[in-house]
Image (tube, rainbow, N blue to C red):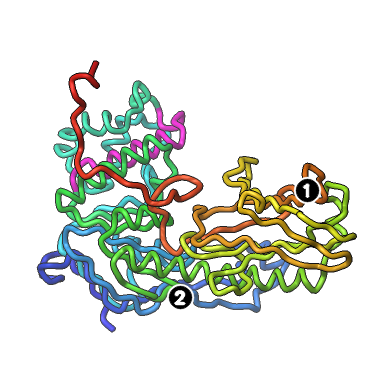
């Protein structure tokens, strides 16, 4: 197939800024490199030869003008390789890329800086590398210095800059002239929180002004917020192209399924090689012992994690050493930092249990739906009666909560739907006093 990269409106239909057609990219890799004469003399010639790594395989998509297009997928899926092809850094092995205008790229901020030159001098150097004229650089110089916000360091050698200062200056130089098409890798994520907010605010301004943005990100919430469409790449192949919500949700479901299978296999291995002796470390008088905790999904099947927003059950297994009655079970869901986010108790729900000597039974606590936000937590269990503690297992069981979509509200738990006023109100004169 003929490889063609057009830079002009004639290369793409009027409604599209970028058209990617059947693009593949392969790299030749030496299995065992022996570059120097000494290595070849001591170790001999490599017999393993070369192999081809296929980073992209027949990838096609179109990006409409004035939209933000996201690329998501696991590490090594081909996202950054695709961006470098769009930016002109790489040429595809086969296929074609057509663009409607000049492409500006944020791939490795500050990569063209000279350590011995000052920040001001590097603005001119890096601007020239990016294709800016001296007049364009001079017209945007004050804006760049203000946006980078590195103070008097602008006239100090870049070699004394922190990595954050270098990134801020690199970003400012790269976006000083509002681009028609902007390619952004996740490199801006290395900055501090204030800088990231500033960058994303500016990118939103560019989007609102009609700039076409192609964005690689591992932040799925950012992809949902900023992107109109998303392509999900998996081992160099297109898995899905859809609107941001649909693609991100599908990607999350696939990640959850993969983790589910992995954890299920680990759990099966643990069952084959149990470590029941560890439960002797539990506190309490030992009249009964918690001997295991299971997680069950909405269908009642054993699961390696619970899913936020869906039904889920915590099943606590207990073995009694003697007959017990009126036993209450208390649970605590605890963060890694030791903060208890919830502590349901069977007595408060009117449930007390009888346990028979020598039997292993279980008690279920079902949440419908699970209101805990995605994350990692720990489960504490306690069997008690009238202040007498039979068994206390403090954060012995890991609780993983996953979501099938990006959390829409911050926090550790999701509150039940509240009631909002229909309109905003104006306080009365008495209330103002």
Q: Can residue 57 be seen in this view?
A: yes
Quick one: 216 or 276, which is closer to the camera? 276
> Quadrant of residue 296 in the image?
bottom right
Residues packed near mark 2 inside 10 Å, few (<14), some (14 to 19) or many (20 plus): some
Say above or below: 161 vs 26.
above
Residue bearing mark 2? 54
Q: Can residue 128 be seen in this view?
A: no
Horizontal and vertical percent position of residue 192:
43, 37
Horizontal and vertical percent position of residue 393:
76, 50
Q: How far apart are marks 1 and 2 (CA)?
A: 64 Å
Q: Disc number at residue 385?
A: 1
Range of residues picked out in magenta? 157-178
Mark 2 residue element: strand
Say above or below: 31 vs 104.
below
Horizontal and vertical percent position of residue 97:
25, 71
Q: Does the magenta stretch include residue 129?
A: no
- The residue under the point 39% across, 63% down is 72
């Amino acid at each position: 197939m003929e490889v063609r990269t057009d830079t002009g409106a004639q290369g793409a239909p009027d409604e599209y800024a970028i058209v990617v057609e059947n693009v593949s990219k392969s790299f030749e890799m030496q299995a065992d490199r022996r570059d120097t004469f000494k290595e070849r003399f001591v170790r001999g010639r490599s017999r393993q030869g070369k192999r081809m790594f296929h980073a992209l395989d027949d990838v096609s998509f179109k990006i409409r003008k004035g939209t933000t297009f996201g690329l998501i997928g696991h590490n090594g899926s081909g996202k950054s390789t695709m961006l470098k092809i769009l930016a002109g850094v790489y040429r595809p092995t086969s296929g074609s890329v057509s663009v409607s205008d000049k492409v500006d790229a944020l791939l490795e901020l500050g990569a063209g800086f000279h350590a011995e030159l000052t920040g001001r001098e590097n603005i001119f150097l890096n601007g020239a590398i990016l294709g800016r004229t001296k007049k364009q650089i001079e017209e945007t110089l004050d804006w760049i210095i203000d946006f980078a916000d590195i103070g008097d360091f602008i006239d100090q050698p870049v070699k004394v800059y922190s990595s954050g200062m270098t990134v801020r200056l690199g970003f400012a130089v790269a976006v000083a002239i509002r681009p028609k098409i902007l390619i952004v890798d996740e490199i801006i994520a290395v900055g501090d929180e204030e800088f990231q907010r500033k960058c994303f605010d500016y990118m939103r301004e560019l989007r609102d002004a009609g700039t076409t943005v192609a964005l690689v990100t591992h932040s799925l919430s950012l992809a949902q917020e900023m992107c109109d469409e998303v392509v999900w790449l998996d081992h160099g192949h297109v898995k899905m192209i859809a609107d941001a919500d649909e693609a991100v949700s599908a990607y999350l479901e696939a990640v959850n399924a993969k983790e589910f299978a992995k954890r299920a296999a680990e759990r099966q291995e643990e069952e084959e090689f149990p470590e029941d002796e560890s439960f002797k470390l539990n506190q309490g008088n030992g009249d009964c012992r918690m001997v295991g905790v299971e997680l069950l999904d909405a269908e009642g099947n054993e699961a390696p994690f619970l899913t936020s927003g869906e039904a889920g059950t915590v099943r606590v297994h207990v073995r009694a050493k003697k007959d017990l009655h009126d036993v209450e079970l208390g649970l605590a869901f605890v963060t890694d930092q030791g903060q208890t986010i919830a502590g349901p108790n069977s007595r408060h729900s009117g449930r007390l249990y009888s346990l028979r000597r020598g039997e292993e039974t279980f008690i279920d606590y079902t949440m419908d739906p699970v209101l805990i936000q995605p994350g990692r937590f720990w489960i504490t269990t306690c069997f008690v009666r009238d202040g007498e503690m039979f068994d206390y297992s403090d954060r012995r069981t890991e609780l993983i909560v996953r979501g099938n979509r990006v959390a829409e509200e911050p926090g550790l738990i999701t509150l039940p739907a509240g009631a909002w006023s229909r309109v905003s109100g104006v306080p009365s004169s008495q209330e103002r006093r």
